[in-house]
Amino acid sequence: MSTSSAETAAKTIELRIAPRARDLGGFSVRRALPDDRRQMVGPFIFYDHFGPVQFMPGQGMDVRPHPHIGLATVTYLFDGRILHRDSLANVQEIAPGAMNLMTAGRGIVHSERTPPGPRAAGQQMLGVQSWLALPLAHEETEPSFQHFGVDVLPAVEDRGVFARVIAGAAFGAVSPVKTLSDWFYVELRLAGGASAPLDAAYEQRGLYLVDGAIEIAGSRFDEPQLLIFSPGAAITIRALSDARMMLLGGAPIEGRRFVWWNLVSSSKERIEQAKRDWREGLFPSVPGDTEFIPLPEE
């Protein structure tokens, strides 16, 4: 890369984060957020990339019921299926390409498991899970769960570019998902040689590269990583091979957030209260799923 290309990349890309490996009891994830250098991109405060992992027949994922406050979760799959159950009595099988937005607000409990059919047959899984910090005015909102099938979310296809608009607006399309703050989320797939712009409609923007190789501002990127772009910078993404990535960001959230285990809040005292509530069994239960995860060691 030439000196001028390096200077252009430095003006375009504010931060490059290599995700850290984390073991979640049986399979590993790559965690890009939070990072010591950056807590959030728009409201995105947590970002996990899991898989590809192959479960043999009889095996599967079993994330037992656990609590959340002060955030919304988005589970997005490229491959495999997950059965979501929550304390509002929602039971939803999550399929590739669908949008599943769970808003915890003042408190929700959910479990994530491999559905019976895929567990019996075995399956490969690949996906991303993110958390979004809620605005101060909505931290204690009523919990809720929204599901939008792959056939409902708008998709744009043109000359080697495929974009599914999961939330917000991008590529001339608007997602039907209702959000509590201004943010966007897009699955973008590029055939080798294809290019796509990322406009500056949102103040904070990032790109998580799932697989493939891309070029931005003269720099090559070819492994899973999170790129955070400078506000207002003109971005063009060019695929050096077939590539898949997630575009994310939005308006910044007011103030900082504290994160402990599955709990997010602008108040340390609120997190301590949630810890006491979980320890004392005061959170609602998940119908049909009676297992329990104790609080982690302090």
Image (cartoon, helix red, strand yellow):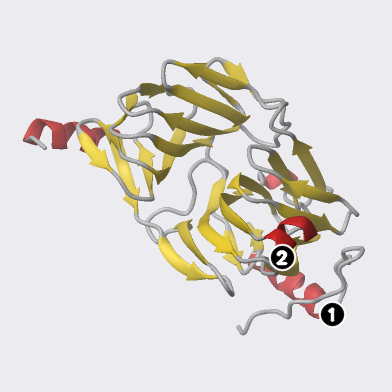
Quickly name the residue at label 1. Answer: 280
Residue 154: image location, x then y, percent: 64, 22
Decide if residue 294 is on the left or right side of residue 28.
right
Residue at figure coordinates x 61%, y 28% from the top left: 168
**Which amino acid type corresponds to the residue marked 1 in the rendered image?**
Glu
Position of residue 224 relative to residue 149, above or below, is: below
On the image, the x and y values in percent for residue 245 come to 45, 39
Q: Nearer the viewer, residue 97 or 297?
A: 97
Q: Amino acid at mark 2?
A: Arg
Residue 107 seen anywhere in this rendered image of the structure: no
Q: What residue do we see at 24% from left, 30% from top?
A: 217
Q: Quadrant of residue 11?
A: top left
Question: Which residue: 15% across, 37% down?
Answer: 6
Earlier-in-chain disc, 2 versus 1: 2
Identify the residue at horizontal 58%, vertical 50% (top origin). 130
Assign the N terminus to one quadrant of the image: top left
